[in-house]
Image (cartoon, rainbow, N blue to C red):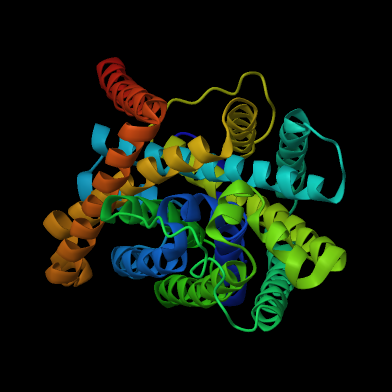
Amino acid sequence: MEHSGEHASEYKKDSLTLAGAVAMGTGVMIGAGIFALTGQVAELAKHWFPLAFLAAAIVASFSAYSYVKMANAYPSAGGIAMFLEKAYGKTTLTGAFALLMYFSMIINESLVAKTFGTYTLQLFNFGEYSWLVVALGVGLLAFAFLVNILSNEYIQKLSFFTAFIKIGGIVVFAIGGLWASGFSFESSSSTDKTGAGPGEFLGAVALAILAYKGFTTITNSGGELKNPHKNVGRAIIISIALCLVLYMLVTLAVGGSLTVHEIIKAKDYSLAEAARPAFGDYGLWFTVLFAIIATVSGVIASVFAVSRMLAMLTDMKLVPHSHFGMPGSIQKHTLVYTVIMAMLLTVFFDLSRIASLGAIFYIIMDIAIHWGVLYHLRKDVEANSLVLITAIILDVVVLGAFLVVKAQTDMLVIYVSLAGLSLIFLGVWLFLNFSQTDS
């Protein structure tokens, strides 16, 4: 394949350890899951929002089954792109579903970048500061680009170091918040007893799934991870379990410090707001500090994995590629494309809509993975059909509920999603047909 030698040189075998893969996976998950999504999930699930994160972990665990089975059988730097090709061949479905994953991760990067800006500005009093949030988010993405130009070893060390800081900081915040609240749950004892209906709760679960989907970035490291046939699956399982514990601690701490109304009012920076009654100004500064560390490392880890996925799609000749006069390898070019698209989303979309788009694109891709394993690869990877069917049903239920909620509250998200899906499928179909014609 064209560029295959050049691209292969970008992937250093055995350059990532199991701990490094877990650090990168949790880096993406924690950055989006806690700081960006707690308030968004609470807005839909009301005082049931901790249970929404628990339910999302169950859905993610069933989803992880397909990825673990595929990664054990076919570890590669292409991750999900390679999994889809194994299931559907070199077809429009493979290219389109892989791009859905790619764009959902770009959306995730934009979500976390804006969260970085929102939390950082809690330290200052700028009044109306929406443009500053955007500017800080774009600046973070530019910084992530510069870091990703460096070696894998440097990125792994940075992810490993920041993972310890994030986990330690979240544990301190959660235990301190629970202790200060007397282990009561303020959001449940609120006078506002307007609960979430089943549809709203399932819609909240769909959003909360984004808090766990970072485990999929681990699959993109199969070509660089030591003992990938076992360690990719191990890293996925460890990351989900670790994040579940952390999310439950934090949501209970936030619910112990704030009412549902207060959480929703401060939905873009709910953890910082929850730190005020529990710890005062010092707690606010502490929370913002580790929010900054979490979001910075989360964006770096996400850009690392996603740019490699697009490079693999280019190598597989499923998407077009142009150098645009840029020097260097394909992976460097895909790094540029990834960061630029994330910057555009950061400028033009708010946090709620970014999260909604990410949830829709990701769950559709997730269903495609399970379907492909069930009907094409189940015997090859020795997967259990009952688990795969359960994963598909869970995805369909939460996605359907989420679409109904959005159709009632924000049709723009539905329109943009449909437009995006149409453009992706049409674009890949045209590219593959013209490529075959030229050949």
Instruction: Work out whether residue 401 can be spotted.
Output: yes
Residue 276 locus on image (x, y percent): 77, 63
Placement of 242 over or under 74, stated as above or below: below
Instruction: Work out whether residue 32 can be spotted.
Output: no
Placement of 415 over or under 72, stated as above or below: above
Which is nearer the eye, 364 or 143? 364
Image quadrant holding the C terminus, namely: top left
Residue at 77%, 38% (x, y): give it: 136
Residue at 71%, 32% (x, y): give it: 134
Residue 350 locus on image (x, y percent): 58, 33
Residue 335 locus on image (x, y percent): 62, 38
Image quadrant holding the N terminus, namely: top left
Placement of 65 over or under 264, stated as above or below: below
Placement of 133 over or under 433, stated as above or below: below
Which is nearer the eye, 51 or 357? 51
Residue at 58%, 30% (x, y): give it: 345
Residue at 64%, 79% (x, y): give it: 178
Residue 117 locus on image (x, y percent): 74, 43
Q: Quadrant of residue 194?
A: bottom left
Which is nearer the eye, 348 or 344? 348
Which is nearer the eye, 51 or 436? 51
Q: Quadrant of residue 111?
A: top right
Number of numbered labels in the structure image: 0
- Direction from residue 49 to residue 251 in the image, left or right: right
